[in-house]
Amino acid sequence: MILAIYYLQVGPDEESGELLPPLSGLSTGKMPAPLDYSEKTTPAAARLLRGFMNFYAGFAWGKEVISVCKGKRTWPSASRPAHVLLHEDGKTKQPGPNIEDPFETTSNLGTCMHWLSMSRLTEELNRSKKLCVAGVSLAELLEPWTPPEQQEE
């Protein structure tokens, strides 16, 4: 849900502009003032879904902080370093997600991921992006994916 909200804050094209405001008061119980949509055109759901897949398929996971409270693109800092995932070999590192908890902003919700879950997320986003570009139906896009059987060596 946080990824969807963040995308609607920063990802949609310039034509539709910001679709959701920053949720800076969420941790204190203050809700933001609603945006004025009287002169905006809301993109179709299919266009938003395709945009979501494109946005996160090319996302710089280790270089950007997903913060629905700020509602704008931000980067890790000295006080909040980038999350790094260590592969099971104990040596290989890969960028991990930096997802700010909107209710406890010092907490990174991405720390629950490990190298395999991050690899699967990236793989699935890239697969979805390709399917969206190919113009498949929503039913085909949402069809559960099953990994090929592992061949015994």
Image: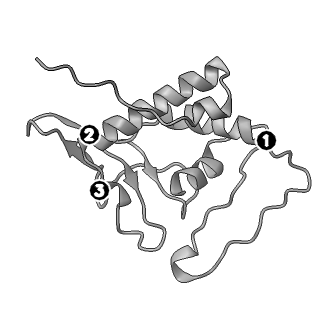
Callout 1: SS: loop
Q: Can you name the residue that lies furthest to the left here?
A: 90
Residue 151, picture quadrant: top left
Instruction: Kindly tell me whether residue 13 is visible in this rendering.
Output: no
Disc 3 to disc 2, C-alpha distance:
13 Å
Q: Name the residue rendered at 32%, 35% in the picture.
A: 119
Q: Are marks 1 and 2 in contact (CB under 8 Å)?
A: no
Q: Name the residue rendered at 35%, 36% in the picture.
A: 120
- The residue carrying mark 1 is 43
Q: Are marks 3 and 2 in contact (CB under 8 Å)?
A: no
Q: Can you name the residue that lies furthest to the right here?
A: 38
Q: Nearer the viewer, residue 140 or 59?
A: 140
Identity of the amino acid at label 1? Pro
Q: Name the residue rendered at 24%, 41% in the picture.
A: 115
In the displayed structure, 132 sits above or below 89; it is above
Q: Nearer the viewer, residue 74 or 87?
A: 87
Whether residue 31 sits left or right of residue 76 in the image: it is right
Packing grade of label 2 (10 A; few <14, some 14-19, many >=20) is: few
Q: Position of residue 82 (x, y in %)?
A: 30, 49
Q: Name the residue rendered at 53%, 82% in the picture.
A: 28
Packing grade of label 3 (10 A; few <14, some 14-19, many >=20) is: some
